[in-house]
Image (spheres, rainbow, N blue to C red):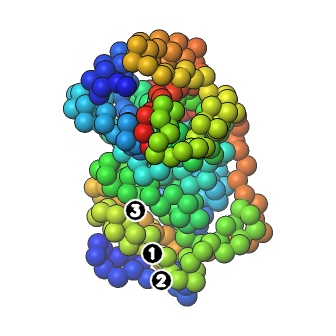
Amino acid sequence: MSVPIGAETLPSAGTSRMSQLDVLTTLHERRGARDVVITTMTPARDWMTLAPHPLDLVFVPSAMGHATSIGLGLALAQPERRVIVCNGDGSMLMNLGSLASIAESGAANLVVLVFVNGVYEVTGSQRVPAVASHGVDFAAIARGCGIRSTFTFSNIDEWRRDAAAVLGAAGPTVVHLAVAGVPGKPGPRSPGPAGERAHRFMDALAR
Amino acid sequence: MFSGDQITNALDQLGITHVVTVPDSTIGQWHDAIEHSGHTQLVRVCREGEAWEVAAGLHLGGARPLVMIQCTGLFESGDAIRNVLHDWKLPIPSIIGYRSYLNQDTIPGDTCLVFTEPVLDTWCIDYKLLTSPEQLSTITDHLGGCRAAGRPGAIVVAEGKA
């Protein structure tokens, strides 16, 4: 379900949930050739099952919570590119202040997708505080920080229908995506030495 | 110890494009000069760990950022420093305010004096401690040298009040 600015968003508990891989597959289909896509935690794991792109930044290893911050820096340095961050709910809560930093920056080319499954899946699906039990609403939090472009989806057909428009909205944009956890599935594995990947990524940006 | 104009001039000489910062009572006095320099963009963040990762993104994107925080924020930044400087091997420079170094009247026994330099050593950050205005040129000399060598360098500025 897509929710326009200012409308009531659904609590996480009890709502339908999308497959994270389906959501990412749609993003993979809709991303532009010049777009940067940053992934971390389980979105990184699932993203790596799809065809790679030179402007993918798999943020593994990470400092948990900081994918939004590295995305903000990239968006400021590359204002002509769209920068899309695929973050988890536990990660987002670990660095909620970054939403205020993003609002302050006014980075119109930054899109933060928050994959909300209510659990720390990579460590065995322990509960993330308040997400499932109290319906933490990341779109509402973003609006409270002053980010005007916010959306919420829990239906994959609506995400498929609206994803291109969401990605193309004047940002910064924050999207709350209700997805199902996959208990027992392993966490992401680093695709190679980070320092070497940093150089390759910088080369790709320079081309 | 240093004016905003002196710091801005040093940043210009280093080609710094963005200063990513959380203020303290010393660093904060430089913000206006940096912001109005016309050369360097001030990026305000909410917590110091953020500053390192925003700087990482800026660096990856081809900019030349510098992190400007207090030593208490250095302590807060641990995992981000590990990730940015050591996992991703990005040589992000920094200027770090050293709380209470010159004067402990506000916080007698301030433990910043116990931990700041050992923490910098632990994170393998090549730093120079500045304790007098005559050391201004050390900022460009040291950070320029660290950049040429491809390693993260820091300037630690002694502060006189909390």
Residue A127 placed where, x, y %? 66, 75
Residue B60 placed where, x, y %? 49, 33
**Amino acid type of the residue that numbered disc 2 sits on in the rendered structure:** Pro
Is A119 drawn above or below residue A203 in the view shown? below
| Snapshot quadrant of residue A133 | bottom right
Is A117 drawn above or below residue A189 in the view shown? below
Mark 1 neighbour density, 10 Å: few (under 14) some (14–19) many (20 or more): some
Residue A89 at least partly seen: yes
* Mark 2 and mark 3 residues within 8 Å of each other at the beta carbon: no
Residue found at x 49% / y 21%: B130
**Amino acid type of the residue that numbered disc 3 sits on in the rendered structure:** Val
Residue A180 placed where, x, y %? 61, 74
Asked whether, in this view, residue B47 is left or right of residue B34, the answer is right
* Mark 2 and mark 1 residues within 8 Å of each other at the beta carbon: yes
Instruction: Name the residue tied to disc 2.
Output: A11
Mark 3 neighbour density, 10 Å: few (under 14) some (14–19) many (20 or more): many
CA distance for labels 2 and 3: 16 Å
Residue A160 placed where, x, y %? 44, 67
In primary-sequence order, the first of circles 2 and 1 is: 2
**Nearer the observer, B129 or A35:** B129
| Snapshot quadrant of residue A116 | bottom right
Residue found at x 71% / y 71%: A125
Instruction: Name the residue tied to disc 1.
Output: A137
